[in-house]
Amino acid sequence: MTICSNRLALGRGLAFALVLVAFASACAGAPDAQASTATLDGAEATGSTTSDLRVPTLPASRLTLLAADALVANDTSLRGVTGFVSHLADDGILLARRQNLLQGKAAITSYLTGAASPIPVGGTLGWRYVRGDVSALGDFGYTLGWLEIVGPQDAAGNATVTYSVYNAIWQRSLTGEWKITVFSKTDLGSAPAAPPPTLLPLTDDGPVYPTLKGDVATANALLGMDRDFSTYTGRVGRQIGFDAYVDENGISIDDPLLFGRKAIFDSNAGIPTTSTLAWAPLLARASRSGDLGFTLGTYESGSLNAAGEHQVGYGKYLTVWKRTADGSFKYVVDGGSSSPAPTPSP
C-alpha cells in the first residue's frame, strides 16, 4: 500500500500543519478522492486505485472528509495557526503532552503560538496519513497518522528530529461543513513502524450496522461502557481487560505504535501486578447513525520505582469506538498523553 507523505518548511505560524496537511495536501489531487456543544465539566453527552493512494470505493458523502482534509491543509499552509484554528469547532479540544485538556479556540491558539508550543520555528515537517473512517450517515469521522519534525540546524549542522502520532475527531454539520472537535497529539521516541499492508487508509464498510438510535443515546452508552472498561481492567489486569474491548484491527497509540488486537495483547504481557491504571470518561460524542463515536477523559497510573517507592502518573486519553457486526462496540483507536498532577484542593 502506498501511503501519502510530504514535507513542509515550518515556522511557528505553520505549527499545526501537522494536523490535516498530513494527508490532504499530498492526496487532494487524487482523481478518486472526491469527495451539540459540550464542555469538560460533566459526564453527560449532549475500493479503487489512484496513482498516490489506494482508496476504497465509497459514496461521495463519506469521502467529503478527505476534501475537508485538503481544505484545512490549504488554509493552514497559507495562514498557519489561524488557518488551522478556523476549522476547529467552537468548543474544540486539544490533547497535548504535559498539558491539561485545552478547550476552545482562544486557549488552543494561545498554546500553539506560545513558548510551550511543541513545534520549533524553522526546520521541516514530514507527515503520513495512516487511517480514517466515516459514519454510515456521513456526519462523524476520524483521521489518524504520524509526523516527523526536523528542527533547524545548529552551528555544527545537527538537527533534532521528533516523531508524533495525531488522531483527529471530526463532526459534520447539517450544512455539510466538517469541523475538528478533538485533536490529540502523542509524542514518540523514534520513527513509527509502517502499518500492516492490509490496513486500508479509509475503511469500506458501507452502512455499518446503524442503530439510528441517535447520537445522544449512543454517546451515553459509550460513557457507561468506558467506565465498565476501566473497572473490568482494574479487576482482571491490563492484558485481559484491553483484549476484551479492542477491535481485531485496533490501533494503540503507544511507543511504539501497535497495530491489531494480537500486538496489543502481547504488549500488555508481563505487566507487574503492582502496576495500576484507572480512568474516567469526561465526554462522549457519537454519530447520528450510532455506529461510530469517541470517549475522552483522564487517567491515573501507578507503579513502583527501582527503590520500591510508589509513583503516580496523570494523563488524558482519547478512544475511538466502532459498532461491530454483533451490535457491540469495540475500540479502533486508543491513546493519550501525560498531564500535570492535579492541583490539591484548598
Image (spheres, rainbow, N blue to C red):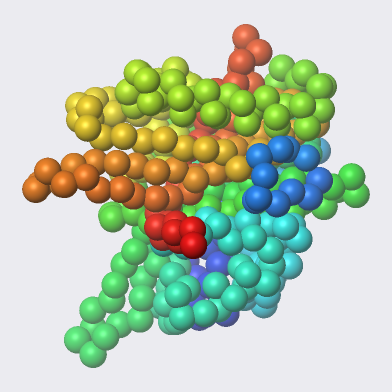
The residue furthest front is 346
Q: Position of residue 207 (x, y in %)?
A: 75, 22
Residue 33 sits in which quadrant? top right
Left or right: 318 as drawn, with respect to 126: right
Above or below 83: residue 344 = above
Compare residues 5 and 203 and report the one nearer the observer: 203
The residue located at (57%, 38%) in the rendering is 281
The residue located at (37%, 20%) in the rendering is 235
Q: Position of residue 25 (x, y in %)?
A: 61, 60
Q: Position of residue 237 (x, y in %)?
A: 32, 23
Q: In the rendered picture of this protein, how many numbered marks are placed on residues?
A: 0
The residue furthest right is 175
Residue 119 sits in which quadrant? bottom left
Compare residues 320 and 30 and report the one nearer the observer: 320
The residue furthest left is 307
The residue located at (73%, 67%) in the rendering is 86
Q: Is residue 322 visible?
A: no
The residue located at (89%, 45%) in the rendering is 174
Above or below 211: residue 334 = below
Q: Position of residue 308 (x, y in %)?
A: 12, 43
Left or right: 187 as drawn, with respect to 81: left
Residue 215 sits in which quadrant? top right
The residue furthest bottom is 155
Q: Is residue 148 visible?
A: yes
Compare residues 332 and 24 and report the one nearer the observer: 332
Above or below 275: residue 102 = below
